[in-house]
């Protein structure tokens, strides 16, 4: 069984927001919903030594997802390959998962009355492809793959570079890793 | 608006208020019957308890994005919301059955053993309903104002306080007696002390993000609501009224206690909008449209 994860290399992300747009268009998201924003820190420093970092955010597909535990209907689920997703039919829009998620990765769709989120484009993944945000990243700042495969690009990258996870102190065990400067 | 990360709204606060107060009323009715006989609570007060819990459940349903699918919240036994929903249902049932023993024309009115069993069941389920909103909120690691066990005590205390005040109001309005003034005064003192300590500990003894939101209660967006309404009108004013001997405005004190309890829940729920922000996220969100812009309306 695979264990899917994503690495975001902030050293080469230029903050173009292509991933944000690709996600919105291909997942046909409402105009006011963003699954994967790209935040910017900086510029910091003093000219000419300035620095700016772009941090793409998305669902962390945690190993210990608080959103799944919080869901009273069983709509929020985690597959064996680690992908956390929402079964629309079962979702009643109670927003328990929105409040439980430390990463702001859950988005209520008030018109439909359900909560939506990034699911690593699991239909594409099941078909052997990569998520839209990964395919569209021209800098290859997003690396997606199977951590259970020791020879996968993502495994080799994580073994060779120092990476961090967001809010590790909360014990959610995110499966999105960041390579920072 | 969704860009602003839509969170729980005022209807959930109202649910917490009615469910907590009703749960405590059900539990207190059972306790008073088992230890002091039937004289301490009015029959109508015993009936109002489960009605309040049902009203809370109604607001919870209205808060849902798809209210007609509300039955689904009973489906995941691992979720605390499911646990709460089942307990609310049981508390409503036990509360009504227990209250019905007071109606002499009903055939089971004299079944003491059944009344005692129902009283115990009412106490257990009522106390769970009175406590569980605090447990629900306290488990949210990423909501700095809620996280930790302190909020559980505050919600249980507020539920007991409002439940007792509601019984007291029912007694004075429908049974022409008031029984709980001194007890209510004691609980109000406890409420002032515990809230003061909670905010003090959040400000000084925890993480920076917890201190940041707690500071909003001291001298920020929530300061007026905290000092003037929760502690002032909702606690100290009724405390003074309850301590006055034979005063004619006892009913006002009860109403103020209930308003204070409802207000506290709204402020706590509202404070949950402050999440632990990710790097750059707060600035990013601040630059997004709020949702009422003309171009967004045109796009829809």
Image (cartoon, coloured by chain):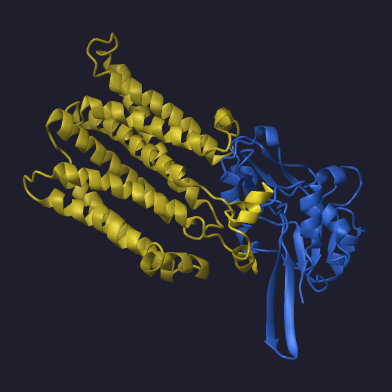
Chain colours: A blue, B yellow
Q: Position of residue A83 (x, y in %)?
A: 76, 47
Question: Which residue shows up at 82% across the image and 56% down it?
Answer: A133
Q: Is residue B125 visible?
A: no
Front one among B93 and B176 = B176
Q: Position of residue B167 (x, y in %)?
A: 23, 35
Q: Quadrant of residue A139?
A: bottom right
Front one among B71 and B36 = B71
Q: In the rendered view of the protein, which quadrant contains the N terminus of chain A? A: top right
Question: Which residue shows up at 54% across the image and 50% down it?
Answer: B7
Residue sitting farthest toward the left: B246
Q: Quadrant of residue A153?
A: bottom right
Q: Position of residue A80 (x, y in %)?
A: 78, 42
Q: Is residue B140 visible?
A: yes
Could you tell whether A150 is left or right of B132 in the image?
right
Question: Which residue shows up at 89% across the image and 54% down it?
Answer: A149
Is B105 situated above or below B299?
Answer: above
Is B103 situated above or below A39?
Answer: above
Is B189 situated above or below B57?
Answer: below
Could you tell whether B97 is left or right of A91 in the image?
left
Front one among A94 and B137 = A94
Q: In the rendered view of the protein, which quadrant contains the C terminus of chain A? A: bottom right
Could you tell whether A124 is left or right of B77 in the image?
right
Q: Position of residue B270 (x, y in %)?
A: 46, 54
Q: Quadrant of residue B29?
A: top left
């Amino acid at each position: 069984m695979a264990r899917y994860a994503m690495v975001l290399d902030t050293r080469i992300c230029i903050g173009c927001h292509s991933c944000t747009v690709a996600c919105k268009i291909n997942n046909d998201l409402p105009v006011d919903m963003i699954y994967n924003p790209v935040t910017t820190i900086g510029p910091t420093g003093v000219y000419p030594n300035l620095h700016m970092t772009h941090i793409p955010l998305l669902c962390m597909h945690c190993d210990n997802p608080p959103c799944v535990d919080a869901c009273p209907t069983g709509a929020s689920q985690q597959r064996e390959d680690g992908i956390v997703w929402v079964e629309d039919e079962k979702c009643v829009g109670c927003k328990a998962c929105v409040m439980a998620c430390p990463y702001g990765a859950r988005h209520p769709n008030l018109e439909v009355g359900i909560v939506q989120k990034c699911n690593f484009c699991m239909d594409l993944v099941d078909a052997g492809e990569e998520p839209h945000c990964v395919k569209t990243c021209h800098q290859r700042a997003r690396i997606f793959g199977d951590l259970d495969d020791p020879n996968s690009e993502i495994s080799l990258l994580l073994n060779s570079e120092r990476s961090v996870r967001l809010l590790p102190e909360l014990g959610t065990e995110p499966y999105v890793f960041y390579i920072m400067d | 608006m969704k860009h602003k990360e839509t969170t729980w709204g005022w209807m959930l606060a109202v649910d917490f208020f009615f469910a907590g107060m009703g749960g405590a009323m059900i539990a207190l009715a059972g306790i008073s019957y088992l230890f002091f006989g039937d004289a301490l609570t009015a029959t109508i007060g015993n009936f109002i308890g489960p009605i309040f819990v049902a009203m809370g459940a109604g607001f919870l349903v209205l808060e849902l994005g798809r209210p007609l699918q509300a039955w689904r919240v009973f489906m995941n036994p691992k979720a605390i919301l499911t646990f709460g929903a089942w307990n609310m249902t049981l508390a409503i049932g036990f509360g009504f059955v227990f209250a019905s023993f007071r109606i002499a024309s009903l055939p089971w009115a004299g079944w003491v053993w059944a009344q005692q069993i129902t009283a115990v069941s009412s106490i257990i389920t009522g106390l769970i309903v009175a406590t569980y909103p605090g447990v629900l909120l306290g488990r949210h690691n990423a909501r700095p104002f809620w996280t930790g066990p302190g909020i559980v005590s505050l919600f249980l205390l507020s539920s007991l306080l409002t439940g007792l005040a509601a019984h007291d109001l029912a007694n004075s309005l429908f049974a022409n007696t008031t029984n709980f003034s001194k007890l209510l005064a004691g609980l109000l003192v406890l409420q002032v002390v515990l809230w003061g300590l909670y905010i003090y500990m959040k400000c000084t003894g925890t993480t920076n993000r917890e201190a940041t939101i707690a500071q909003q209660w001291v001298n920020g967006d929530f300061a007026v609501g905290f000092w003037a309404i929760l502690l002032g009108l909702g606690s100290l004013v009724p405390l003074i009224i309850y301590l006055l001997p034979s005063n004619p405005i006892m009913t006002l004190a009860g109403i103020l206690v209930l308003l204070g309890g409802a207000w506290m829940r709204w402020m706590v729920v509202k404070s949950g909008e402050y999440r632990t922000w990710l790097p750059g996220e707060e600035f990013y969100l601040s630059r997004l449209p709020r949702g009422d812009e003309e171009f967004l309306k045109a796009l829809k």
